[in-house]
Image: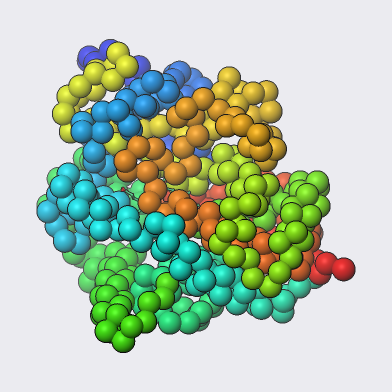
Amino acid sequence: MSYWKRRNIIEVEGKSLFTGHYHLFFADKEKTFTRKLGDFTKSYGKTYGIYQGLNKIIVTNDLDIISEVFVKQFENFHGRQVNPFVGDPEKEKMVHMFFARGARWKRLRALASPAFTNANLKKIHETVEDSALEMVKLLDKVADKEINIRDYFNEYTMDIICRVSMGQTESKMFKNPYFFDVDYTSFFPMMAYCGLIPSFLIKLSFMIGAMIPNSEVDIFLKLTDKIGKAVEARIKQREDDEKRGIEKGEPSDFIDMFLDAKVDELPDEGGEEYSRANVSSIDYDTLGRLKYLEAVFKETLRVYPLAASANARECTRTTTAAGLRIEKGESVMTDTWTLHHDKNLWGPDADEFVPERWLNKIPHPQGAYLPFGAGPRMCIGMRLAYIEEKVALCHILRKYDIAEGPNTGEELNLRGTALVHPTHVKVILKTRN
Ligand code: HEM
């Protein structure tokens, strides 16, 4: 009898010896990992078991279990599932906050949190706005033509990260040395097999990959190395700045663009709001008043929860959560796409893009909206993401209407594993009269 059957948990059919259920995900080229989960939820219900190689994952959309796992029983679920590429999440220096756990995670989170206080975000806002204005200058050159706005937002968000955390002193969009537009789609599936292959073999294959120039492992390591050096340079620069008395301060933006182009009423409603903020600079406090824009951002991430695969925790001590026994070593993952489109939670228009649902009330039961996760490990950069998105859209919509082009298409072509992204978002920025 299989593990899940012994545990009295429904098991998805089609398990293979080598990949568990992961071959089912990667065989479906049309659906990203997190959307494929929706097919299983339809067939197997709210809670069921899958295998990632040998790793055991409980997928659930039961709000009580989610609340127990992500919030109330944090002490039993403080880690994410890791693989041998990541290293020891409790000890190794190279393991960053996302994968760290236990005391090491606590320390990293405590060190990073002050960067996202109101006072610091106010400072960061200056840099964000400068990058947004630089992006608009680049967009001016392609106004009234069909463009892939995704490329501009990729550069914009990378520009901000490099300026805010890596010591880059000015905007470098489209000439940023840290920008790697690498498609890791085969790298991540490879990780999926880690549950089965002994970890020394994985480490060996990693070492071999590192010796092959331009292999994905090689590119990944070079990127990690560059980022490490840049962060060290930034620390040094900050120390120098402080001595001299100087203190200076995602990816869903392009999806907003797509939806703006598809929803006729939106540009007008948005436009009115932006013209109220019709000044060359949009200050930090004004951002908080742009309620419709905020509703657009929230609704975009409801319809497209891009980082949904991060919504998972590994159980570090056997426990019971809302009546479900969860064993040490099992992981719990939410099927966030299904949760965000559930008509029982959001109403009959759950599949439609309706920003207005956010205007007057919270439109969902607690725990049903997870674009940034939940509990103590929820996304630390959420407020920065809001600022980036609002500032960029404000500046763009002050000058342009967003219109469909000949290649906008009906559906986004979503790709990716850990993070989902559209391959392109074609729109025309029409100069406003
Ligand atoms: C629209 C943009 C973004 C989305 C949708 C997003 C989504 C997420 C999600 C779903 C998680 C997992 C939360 C959980 O496990 O409960 C996460 C974690 C995280 N995010 Fe974001 N994120 C975004 C932007 C950012 C930005 C701008 C930063 C940094 C400046 C950032 C840094 C992090 C970090 C460090 C974690 C790990 C936190 C921890 O484990 O303690 N994110 N994010």
Q: Can I make out residue 90 in this image?
A: yes
Total tally of numbered discs in the picture: 0
Q: Which of 391 and 405 is in front in this view?
A: 391
Task: Identify which residue is drawn at 53% across, 77% down.
Answer: 173
Q: Which colour scheme is used?
A: rainbow
**In the displayed structure image, the side of residue 11 where residue 317 appears, left or right:** left
**In the displayed structure image, the side of residue 429 where residue 418 appears, left or right:** left
Task: Identify which residue is drawn at 39% across, 37% down.
Answer: 374
Quadrant of the rendered structure where residue 185 is? Answer: bottom left
Where does the image place residue 188, in percent across and percent down from the top left? 36, 51
Q: Which of 381 and 425 is in front in this view?
A: 381
Where does the image place residue 155, in percent across and percent down from the top left? 53, 70
Outermost residue, right direction?
A: 433
Q: Nearer the viewer, residue 341 or 73?
A: 73
Q: Can I make out residue 14 in this image?
A: no
Task: Identify which residue is drawn at 37% across, 43% down.
Answer: 378
Residue 327 sits above or below residue 245 on the image: above
Name the quadrant of the C terminus. bottom right
Where does the image place residue 264, in percent across and percent down from the top left? 81, 47
Task: Identify which residue is drawn at 42% across, 35% down.
Answer: 24
